[in-house]
Image (tube, rainbow, N blue to C red):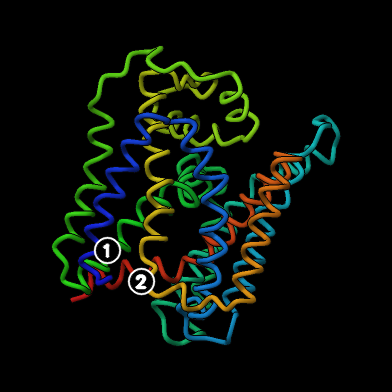
Amino acid sequence: MNAKRVDVLNIGLIILSAVLAFQYPVELFLISFIFIGPLHYFTEINWLDKKNYFIKGPNRLWLWIGLGASVLVMIPKFYVFLSTTRSDSFYEGMIAYDSWTNAFYFLSLVAAAGFVLIKKPVYWIALLIPAIAVALIFNSDYIYKSMIGLFLPTIIHVYIFTLFFMAYGAKKAKSKPGFIAVGVALFIPAIIAGIDVPEGTFQFSASTLQAYEDSGLHSLPAKTAQFFGWSDGSVFNVSGGMGLKLMTFISFIYLYHYLNWFSKTSLIQWHKTLTWQRSLIIAATWFALLVTMYYHFKLGLIIAIFVSTVHVILEFPLNLISIRGLFAK
């Protein structure tokens, strides 16, 4: 399938994702993140590994940087999410440590910029010095924490970086359907924002709401609403109003982000990097993760979030290459 046909397919996938998000705003987010997400992470990491993560440097250097940063980000989250005791000093220490983990996202992004944009290693290493200072100075700043810790690994990665990747691909292929796909993906949030959805429009089952709460995934729309002043963060209602609109938007961008990856199989040929051995390992790991979620939902979910974090950081060089390529003459 050539680039233009893939772009036409993506227009359909964008519309499909939007329709499903309107119909199943909470359920779709849970299903997408739990079932489709991990398969996307594993297959993309495999592809990035074969491409040496789109950096010019020692083989797999960025893999170890990404893994190290992800472990440092996730250590306190593993403990806090799974802990049954929330009053001891160790728990409080993990909370304090977690407040500094945004620095690992930020420094990883700066390091990726160094690899991609600066030719001489001595210069991008020097870039880390002011970056560390920025991370220390702005660590408690609300906007910095929200942009780096909340939005960068979620909405920015899933939606903004995907749009840049799509636009860059459309530019390279000189594909009008590609640019139309970008336009449609940009227009869907406007439709979501413009539709009137009174409180109580949706009534979700108790099991759906319980899974939604247990997953901790409700924190993304809740904190997003708080950031934009739509909620004080203490109460977040997804049955209607702004809460439902935001949940619909998040479900839409997550499902389409995953579908976009699988639709590009013939275009970027990521499936050709899969050997039989790697395919079996990925399939077995994905299945084992689903089984873990079935028997211990929180443990399986936090492992999925860890893998998601790894793939977000490993993708930073590619994200920056897409942005640079889009605006280059």
Q: Nearer the viewer, residue 238 or 202?
A: 202
User: Mark 2 Cα within 10 Å, few/some/many (few <14, many 20+)?
Assistant: some
Q: Is residue 192 left or right of residue 218?
A: left
Q: Quadrant of residue 86?
A: top right
Q: Report x, y in % for residue 205.
A: 54, 19
Q: Which residue is mark 1?
A: 6
Q: Report x, y in % for residue 303.
A: 68, 51
Q: Which mark is residue 266?
A: 2
Residue drawn at 27 percent across, 29 percent down: 193
Q: SS for tag 1?
A: helix
Q: Nearer the viewer, residue 53 or 89?
A: 53
User: Against 99, is 112 above or below?
Assistant: below
The answer to whether one can see residue 133 in this image is: no
User: Against 251, is 208 above or below?
Assistant: above
Q: Quadrant of the N terminus?
A: bottom left
C-alpha distance separating marks 1 and 2: 8 Å
Q: Quadrant of residue 297?
A: top right
Mark 1 and mark 2 in contact? Answer it, CB < 8 Å: yes
The answer to whether one can see residue 176 in this image is: yes
Q: Which amino acid, mark 2?
A: Ser
Q: Nearer the viewer, residue 196 or 220?
A: 196
Q: Which mark is residue 60?
A: none
> Which of the two labelled residues, at mark 1 and mark 2, occupies the earlier sequence position?
1
Q: Nearer the viewer, residue 74 or 246?
A: 246
Q: Report x, y in % for residue 114.
A: 46, 75
Residue drawn at 39 percent across, 31 percent down: 246
User: Mark 1 Cα within 10 Å, few/some/many (few <14, many 20+)?
Assistant: some
Q: Which amino acid, mark 1?
A: Val
Q: Is residue 289 left or right of residue 66?
A: right
